[in-house]
Image (cartoon, grey):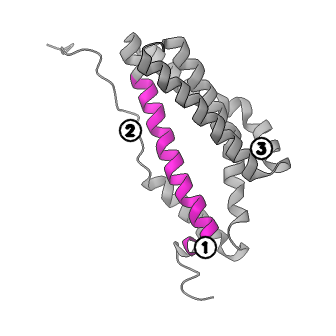
């Protein structure tokens, strides 16, 4: 085995893996930004930390609901087509939500429903996205490809769970 095949980054020389890796970085960074923006908008609209927490529920509850059906779909359908359809639907949902927000027509319920719909798209595409790794690299490079994707997730900016959105300009302790 050559030293280049043992490198953590050696799978990046494969165009299909490189595309999947770059697409993952872009998608999951954008997804994290959308979730933060939705939470921030909820606080701006309502001033309620409870409703801001419901945004997180709307994002992640679809994973709980759809994990098994999405896995079955990933195993029985063309993964590429499933990913592309879910991404197109998610883009459509988020474009409509963005337009509603810009026009001032997005209330708390609208934000939660559209965020839930976007979360459903993420839940449907995630198993297909994860298992498509095996289609992009040779078996002997699978450990490096898995580590490369794990490393990528560490490099993607994450929102600190302790981050809070200020709801007023005065201090509660003054």
Q: Is residue 9 above or below residue 63?
A: below
Which residue position is annotated with label 3?
71
Q: Is residue 22 magenta?
A: yes
Which of the numbered marks, if any, corresponds to residue 160? Answer: 2
Q: Secondary structure at mark 2?
A: loop
Picture coordinates of residue 44, whole percent (x, y): 36, 16
Residue closer to the observer: 79 or 164:
79
**Magenta extent:** 11-40
Residue closer to the observer: 162 or 3:
3
Q: Is residue 108 above or below residue 116?
A: above
Q: Residue at x 47, y 39 (%)?
A: 32
Picture coordinates of residue 159, whole percent (x, y): 40, 39
Label count reads 3
Which of the numbered marks, if any, corresponds to residue 151? Answer: none
Where the C terminus falls, by quadrant?
top left
Q: Residue at x 68, y 39 (%)?
A: 86
Tell me: 144 left or right of 29.
right
Q: Residue at x 78, y 47 (%)?
A: 74
Q: Is residue 18 above or below residue 39?
A: below
Tell me: 131 left or right of 170.
right
Badge 3, how many Cα within 10 Å: few under 14, some, many 20+? some
- CA–CA distance in space, label 2 to label 1: 33 Å
Q: Secondary structure at mark 3?
A: helix
| Chief SS of the magenta region | helix
């Amino acid at each position: 085995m050559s030293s280049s095949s043992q490198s953590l980054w050696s799978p990046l020389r494969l165009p299909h893996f490189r595309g999947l890796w770059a697409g993952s970085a872009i998608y999951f960074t954008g997804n994290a930004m959308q979730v933060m923006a939705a939470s921030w908008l909820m606080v701006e609209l309502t001033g309620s930390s409870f409703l801001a927490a419901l945004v997180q529920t709307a994002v992640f509850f679809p994973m709980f609901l759809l994990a098994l059906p999405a896995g079955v779909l990933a195993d029985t359908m063309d993964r590429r087509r499933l990913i592309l359809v879910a991404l197109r639907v998610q883009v459509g949902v988020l474009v409509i939500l963005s337009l509603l927000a810009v026009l001032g027509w997005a209330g708390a319920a609208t934000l939660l429903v559209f965020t839930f719909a976007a979360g459903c798209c993420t839940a449907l595409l995630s198993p297909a996205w994860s298992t498509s790794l095996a289609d992009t690299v040779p078996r002997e490079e699978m450990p490096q490809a898995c580590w490369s994707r794990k490393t990528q997730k560490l490099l993607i900016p994450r929102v600190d769970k302790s981050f809070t959105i200020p709801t007023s300009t005065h201090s509660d302790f003054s």
